[in-house]
Image (cartoon, rainbow, N blue to C red):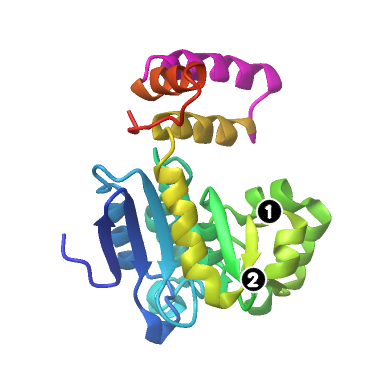
Amino acid sequence: MAYQFVRFEITGPIATLTLARPDKLNALTPDMADEMRHALSSTGTARAVLIRGEGRAFCSGADLSAILGGGDAGEGAYRSLVDHYNPLVMDIAEHRLPIVAEVNGAAAGIGCSIALACDFCLAGQGAYFLQAFVNIGLVPDGGASWILPRLIGKARAAEMLMLGEKVTAEPAADWGLIHRCVEDGQLAEEAQSLAARLAAGPTAALGLMKANLFSGLHHSYGTVMDAEAAAQREAAGTHDAKEGIGAFLGKRAPQFRGE
C-alpha cells in the first residue's frame, strides 16, 4: 500500500509510524486512520512500534472538514468514528507488540485518544493533552470517556472533558495520565531508547501482559487471574521463557528473540 498521509518504516526491531500532515498539525482524516491501521497490520518481524508526529504536533485531532463537511454532519461524524477512528484506537490497544507514543506539541481530541491507547506515552515539556469538544458543542470520542477516568479519576477526567482545558506534559505525568515528561530536545532519543528496550525484551510475554492489563480494566479480579494463568501457560512454552529461566539459573544476561 502506498501511503499518502503517514510514513512507515521498519529499522531493525522497531517499526516507526509517523503521522505526516505537518501543515495540518497531523489532523486525522478517515483515510489517514486507514493508512495507520494498514501500517500497524504490517509490522512483520518488528518487536516494538513507535508512533510519532511530524512537525509541531503529534495530532491536533480529527480533521473536521473531512468528517463534517457536506450532507448530514452527525452521520458523517458517526461513520468516521465507527468505521475508521474507533477501529484504529482498538488496533493500537490490542496490538501484539508494545507501542510507544512520542508526543510533541498537541495531542488533542482523537490524537489524545491515540496517544493514551499506546502502552507508553512519552511527552516533551512543550506537549499538551486536550479534549476541546465542549468548545464546539460536541462530545469526547475515541474512547476518551472510558480511558480518562481510569487513568486519572473522575474529577480530573471531568475537568478535561467538560471544561476543555489543556493539560501540559508535566502535570500529565504527575497525574498518571502519561508515562513520563522529558525535555523537548531529548524526546526523540528517549522514545527511541524506550522502544529499543521493549524490542529487546521477551515480546511474546509482553504481548500477553498487554492483553491482561487491558482486560483488567473492565473484567473482575477473578476473571483476570484466570486470564493470567492461561497467559502464563502460553508464555512458559516460548523460547524466551526457557532462555530467561536458563539465564537466571546460570547467572547471565538473557538473550531474548521475541518468540
Q: In screen coordinates, is 213 left or right of 39?
A: right
> Disc 1 versus disc 2: distance between alpha carbons?
11 Å
* Label 2 SS: strand
Q: Give the quarter of the figure containing the N terminus.
A: bottom left
- Residue 92 drawn at (x, y percent): 44, 48
Amino acid beneath label 1: Leu
Q: Which residue is mark 1?
A: 148
Q: Is residue 194 visible?
A: yes
* Callout 2 crowding tier (Cα within 10 Å): few <14, some 14–19, many ≥20: many
Above or below, comparing residue 237 to residue 258 in the picture: above
- Residue 215 drawn at (x, y percent): 57, 31
- Residue reaching furthest front? 251
Does residue 221 show up magenta in the picture? yes
* Label 1 SS: helix
The one of 7 and 141 positioned closer to us in this rendering: 7
- Residue 195 drawn at (x, y percent): 44, 52
Does label 1 or label 2 sit earlier along the sequence? 2
Main SS category, magenta section: helix
The structure residue drawn at horizontal position 39% and vertical position 52%, both measured from the top left corner, is 49
The segment highlighted magenta reads 217-238
Q: Give the quarter of the figure containing the C terminus.
A: top left
Q: Which residue is mark 2?
A: 130
Quadrant of the image occupied by residue 200: top left
